[in-house]
C-alpha cells in the first residue's frame, strides 16, 4: 500500500512545470493495421507522431533533410523559442515531408538544453500568479516574475475559522471562513465509471461494465464554495491507499440542497502538491493546437440530493455518454505513475493528456516530450491563467478509433513518457508497421513502450481498434493478426533492423516471472520469463552509462543491444537470463561480446 501525505488532498492549482506512437493503417504487404513510429511528427495530416529525444549513443545527430540542422530532439532558437524536427510516419515523404515546428516557451520559462533535449524550463520556483495551499492553514501565492518568482506564505485566520481551500481547477486558492462547530461531519461515497475492454477473442470491445475510479480528486461544493475534499481510494484514518473508489471528505459546513460532488481525473506531485497528471478536453484534431490552447479539464458533477442525500451517498457512476473514456485513460496512466514513482533518484515530470469523444487526433495516439514546448490548459483569459505541463499525450476517441478503451495503447504512450522521463530515447523517426522490421533505434523505443504497456495491463496481447478494424499482437508468442512476426537473422549483425514487437517480446520475457506470487504485483507471466521485475528493469533503464552513451556499440543510436548490455553491466540480469530470451527469437546478441562495464 502506498502512503499519501495528509496535505496532498488539499492542493489543486496551476501546475508549472515526442517520443510517440501512432496507430495508423499500414501499407505493408498484408495491409494489416500497423503501429506508427516515434518520429518527429506532432499533429500533421500524415498521422505521424512527435519526435523522441536524442541523447546518448549517437542520438541527437543532426538531420540533413528538409529540417536542415534541426534534430528531433530540438534546439533553442533563442531564449524563448524551441525548434524541433518532425518526421511524419508515412510511406509518401513527398506528400508529407519532414518539417520544423516552432513553439514558444512563453512567460516565466526559458529554453535550455537538458541532456540534449530542448526544454522550456521554469525560471523561478513557481509561475507568477499561481496559488496553492501548503496545508489547511497556509495559503501559497507565487510572487515576483522570471527567476525571482517564489512562493510566499500567508497564514489563514484560524481564530475566525478560516481554512485554505481550492475550488475547481483554474480558480485560485484562498483563505475562506469555513468554521464548523464540534466534530466535522463526514461525507462518504464511491466514484465509479463505465468502461469497455477487449473481448476474449480480441476482435472487439466487451459490454459496458462498471469499475471503481481510484485516485481521483473529489471536491464537495456548496454553491461555489468548497466545503470538503478527498481522494478516492485513500483512507484518511489509516492514511493507507486501498485502490478502490471510496472517499471520505470531512466537511467544514453542513450540506444543503445546493451541495454538489465534483470529480476530476487529476493526480498530484507528492512533493509539491501541484498537479502531476490530468486529462483535458481536446478541442480538435490538431495535436499542437490542443497543446497550446486546451481550456478545460475533464470533470463530472452530481448533486448530493441526487445521490440519495444525507452523509452516506449512493455511488456516483460516470457514464460512457458523459465521457467515462477520460476516466479510463486516467486510471491506466495513473497506475503507470504509481509503478514508476518507486524509481530511486528520479523526479516525475508533469504530463497532460488530451482526449475528446468527438475528435480523433491527427497522430492517432502519440506522446510529445519537452522539445514540443510542453502542454497547456488555459483556464482563463489572463496571461498567467494557464497550467503548464512538461509533456503531453494525445488519444483518440471517435467511434471508429476508441483508443480510450485500449489499455495497451494508453499504457504504451505512457511507456514513451517513462523512457523520456527516466532514461534516454533514440530520437529516431519514420514509418514503422506491425509486421515489418524497423531501424534499430526506432524498434527499441517502440519495443520498450510496448513491453511496459503489456506489464502495465498484465498480459502479453497488445490489442487496438483503428479505422473500425481490430488487430492484436501477442508479444510472448511472436504472433499477430496475420500470422507469425518476422524474427531477426541469427547470422546477421547486432544492428540489423528489428521488428519492434519481437523486441518487445524479449524485454517482456526478461521482465515477467513464470508465475506470480500472491505478494507480487501482477505484471503478467510467461513460460520463458526470467522474472527481473520492476525494480531491476527500472535500474537497467536508468543506468547512467546507458543514458550518456558509454555503453553504445553497433548502431549509432541507443538500441536493444545497449539495453541488454546495461542489464548485464548493472548485474540486474545474468548471462543466462539474456541468452535465454534472445534464444527465443534468434537475435544474434552474445553476452560474451558486451563492452567493458567499468
Image (cartoon, grey):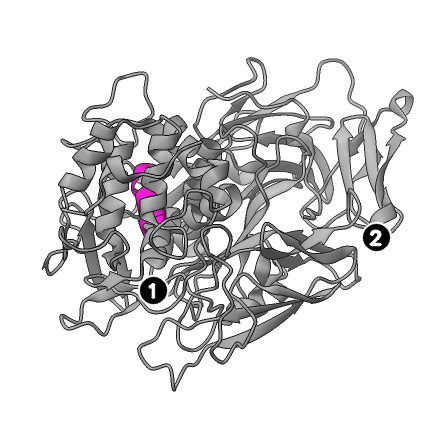
Q: Looking at the image, is mark 1 or mark 2 earlier in the sequence?
A: 1
Q: Residues within 10 Å of mark 1 (few under 14, many from 20)?
A: many
**What residue range appears in magenta?**
447-455
Q: Residue at x 34, y 53 (%)?
A: 446
Label 2 SS: helix
Q: Residue at x 58, y 60 (%)?
A: 371
- Quarter location, residue 346: top right
Above or below, 379 against 83 in this view is above
Magenta stretch containing residue 450, yes or no? yes
Q: Residues within 10 Å of mark 2 (few under 14, many from 20)?
A: some
Q: Residue at x 64, y 58 (%)?
A: 376
Magenta stretch containing residue 591, yes or no? no
Return the residue at label 2: 146
Foreground residue, 397 or 247? 397
Q: Position of residue 53 (x, y in %)?
A: 51, 56
- Dots 1, 2 in contact, CB < 8 A: no
What separation in Å lies between label 1 and label 2 (alpha carbons)?
Answer: 39 Å
Q: Position of residue 452 (x, y in %)?
A: 35, 42
Return the residue at label 1: 36
Foreground residue, 141 or 424? 424
Foreground residue, 155 or 547? 547
Residue 406 in view here: no
Q: Quadrant of the C terminus?
A: top left
- Quarter location, residue 384: bottom right
User: In this image, 488 relative to 365: left or right?
Assistant: left
Q: Position of residue 315 (x, y in %)?
A: 45, 34
Residue 22 in view here: yes
Amino acid at each position: 500500500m502506498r502512503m499519501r501525505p495528509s496535505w496532498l488532498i488539499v492542493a489543486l492549482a496551476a501546475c508549472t512545470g515526442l517520443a510517440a506512437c501512432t496507430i495508423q493503417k499500414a501499407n505493408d504487404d498484408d495491409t494489416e493495421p500497423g503501429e506508427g513510429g516515434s518520429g518527429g511528427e506532432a499533429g500533421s495530416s500524415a498521422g505521424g507522431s512527435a519526435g523522441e529525444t536524442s541523447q546518448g549513443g549517437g542520438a541527437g545527430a543532426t538531420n540533413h533533410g528538409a529540417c536542415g540542422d534541426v534534430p528531433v530532439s530540438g534546439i533553442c532558437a533563442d531564449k524563448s523559442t524551441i525548434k524541433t524536427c518532425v518526421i511524419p510516419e508515412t510511406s509518401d515523404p513527398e506528400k508529407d515531408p519532414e518539417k520544423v515546428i516552432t513553439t514558444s516557451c512563453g512567460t516565466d520559462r526559458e529554453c535550455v538544453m537538458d541532456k540534449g533535449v530542448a526544454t522550456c524550463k521554469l525560471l523561478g520556483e513557481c509561475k507568477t500568479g499561481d496559488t496553492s495551499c501548503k496545508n489547511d492553514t497556509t495559503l501559497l501565492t507565487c510572487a515576483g516574475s522570471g527567476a525571482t518568482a517564489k512562493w510566499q506564505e500567508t497564514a489563514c485566520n484560524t481564530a475566525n475559522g478560516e481554512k485554505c481551500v481550492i475550488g475547481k481547477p483554474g480558480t485560485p486558492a484562498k483563505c475562506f471562513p469555513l468554521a464548523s462547530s464540534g466534530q466535522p461531519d463526514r461525507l462518504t461515497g464511491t466514484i465509479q465509471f463505465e468502461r469497455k475492454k477487449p473481448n476474449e477473442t480480441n476482435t472487439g470491445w466487451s459490454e459496458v461494465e462498471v469499475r471503481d475510479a481510484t485516485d481521483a480528486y473529489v471536491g464537495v461544493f456548496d454553491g461555489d464554495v468548497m466545503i470538503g475534499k478527498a481522494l478516492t481510494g485513500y483512507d484518511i484514518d489509516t492514511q493507507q491507499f486501498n485502490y478502490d473508489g471510496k472517499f471520505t471528505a470531512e466537511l467544514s459546513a453542513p450540506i444543503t440542497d445546493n451541495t454538489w460532488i465534483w470529480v476530476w481525473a487529476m493526480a498530484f506531485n507528492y512533493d509539491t502538491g501541484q498537479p502531476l497528471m490530468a486529462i483535458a478536453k481536446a478541442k480538435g484534431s490538431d495535436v499542437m493546437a490542443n497543446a497550446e490552447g486546451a481550456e478545460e479539464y475533464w470533470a463530472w458533477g452530481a448533486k448530493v440530493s441526487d445521490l440519495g442525500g444525507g452523509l452516506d451517498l449512493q455511488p456516483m457512476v460516470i457514464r460512457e455518454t458523459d465521457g467515462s473514456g477520460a476516466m479510463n485513460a486516467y486510471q491506466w496512466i495513473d497506475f503507470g505513475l504509481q509503478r514508476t514513482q518507486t524509481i530511486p533518484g528520479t523526479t516525475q515530470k508533469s504530463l497532460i493528456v488530451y482526449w475528446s469523444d468527438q475528435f480523433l487526433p491527427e497522430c492517432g495516439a502519440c506522446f510529445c516530450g519537452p522539445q514540443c514546448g510542453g502542454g497547456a490548459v488555459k483556464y482563463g483569459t489572463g496571461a498567467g491563467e494557464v497550467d503548464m505541463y512538461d509533456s503531453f499525450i494525445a488519444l483518440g476517441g471517435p467511434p471508429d478509433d476508441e483508443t480510450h478503451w485500449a489499455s495497451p495503447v494508453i499504457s504504451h504512450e505512457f511507456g514513451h513518457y517513462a523512457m523520456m522521463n527516466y532514461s534516454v530515447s533514440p530520437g529516431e523517426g519514420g514509418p514503422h508497421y506491425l509486421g515489418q522490421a524497423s531501424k534499430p533505434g526506432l524498434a527499441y523505443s517502440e519495443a520498450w513502450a510496448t513491453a511496459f504497456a503489456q506489464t502495465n495491463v498484465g498480459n502479453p496481447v497488445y490489442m487496438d481498434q483503428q479505422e473500425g478494424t481490430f488487430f492484436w499482437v501477442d508479444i510472448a508468442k511472436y504472433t499477430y493478426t496475420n500470422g507469425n512476426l518476422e524474427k531477426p537473422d541469427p547470422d546477421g549483425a547486432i544492428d540489423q533492423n528489428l521488428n519492434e514487437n519481437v523486441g518487445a517480446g524479449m524485454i517482456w520475457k526478461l521482465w515477467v516471472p513464470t508465475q506470480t506470487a500472491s505478494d507480487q504485483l501482477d505484471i503478467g507471466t510467461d513460460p520463458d520469463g526470467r522474472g527481473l521485475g520492476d525494480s531491476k528493469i527500472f535500474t537497467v533503464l536508468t543506468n547512467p552509462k546507458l543514458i550518456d552513451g558509454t555503453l553504445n556499440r553497433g548502431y549509432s543510436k541507443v538500441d536493444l543491444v545497449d539495453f541488454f548490455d546495461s542489464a548485464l553491466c548493472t548485474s540486474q540480469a545474468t548471462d543466462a537470463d539474456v541468452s535465454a530470451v534472445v534464444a527465443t527469437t534468434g537475435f544474434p546478441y552474445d553476452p560474451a561480446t558486451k563492452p567493458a562495464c567499468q
